[in-house]
Image (cartoon, grey):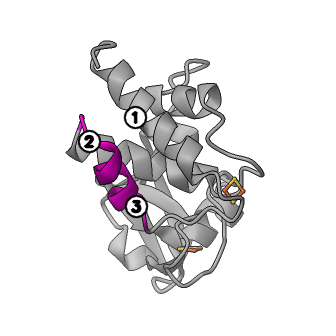
Amino acid sequence: MKPIAFTLNGVAKTVTTDEARNLLWVLRDDFGMTGTKFGCGASFCGACTVLVDGKEVRSCMTPMRNVAGKKVVTVEGLAQGDTLSPVQEAFVEHVGYQCGYCTSGMVIGATALLAANPRPTREQIAQGMERHLCRCAAHLRIVDAIEAAATKMAGGKK
Ligand code: FES
Ligand code: FES
């Protein structure tokens, strides 16, 4: 057990835990951030995706030792008060979900994708999101949502 300090959605946190424990369980069990989901537990599905220093990371396979001193953002940290992020808003408008289980990972993945490439083609969106699985097969609407978010973030220009 060791105290590990990091920033969670802009707030400094310290957790005393096993350094090998994965970030997903610290988020869910220690901080009640249950927006981040457990799917495969093996880095395949993307349900557990969060941002660490702006990069998308699979929290199910990220030991706390790798999080020390870093900035973690979960789906709970994307909205500003009651105002959804452009990606969240576009997922709602385009119904980029069905059961919603993959959605927080998808939204985080899309946020990282648009930070790296603000005007992706549909093909680049599909490629960039291919490691995020949706068992409800909402992929087409998810691509629509990400495309719409990119347009929205560019001030509405197609
Ligand atoms: S639960 Fe982490 S990738 Fe599936
Ligand atoms: S909306 Fe159900 S898994 Fe994607």
CA neighbours of label 3 inside 10 A, class few (<14), some (14 to 19), many (20+): some
| Mark 1 touches mark 2? (CB < 8 Å) | yes
| Residue 74 visible, this angle | no
Which quadrant of the rendered structure holds the C terminus? Answer: top left
Q: Is residue 129 magenta?
A: yes
Point out the stretch of residues depicted in magenta: 118-130
Disc nearer the start of the sequence (3/2): 3
CA neighbours of label 1 inside 10 A, class few (<14), some (14 to 19), many (20+): many
Establish if 94 lies above or below 81: below
Q: Amino acid at mark 1?
A: Glu
CA neighbours of label 2 inside 10 A, class few (<14), some (14 to 19), many (20+): some
Residue 118 picture quarter: top left
Q: Residue 62: x and y, percent?
A: 44, 76
Q: Callout 1: helix, strand or loop?
A: helix
Establish if 88 lies above or below 154: below
In the visual, does 138 lie left or right of 107?
right
In the image, which is nearer the foreground, mark 1 or mark 3? 1
Q: Which residue is denoted by mark 3 in the rendering?
A: 5
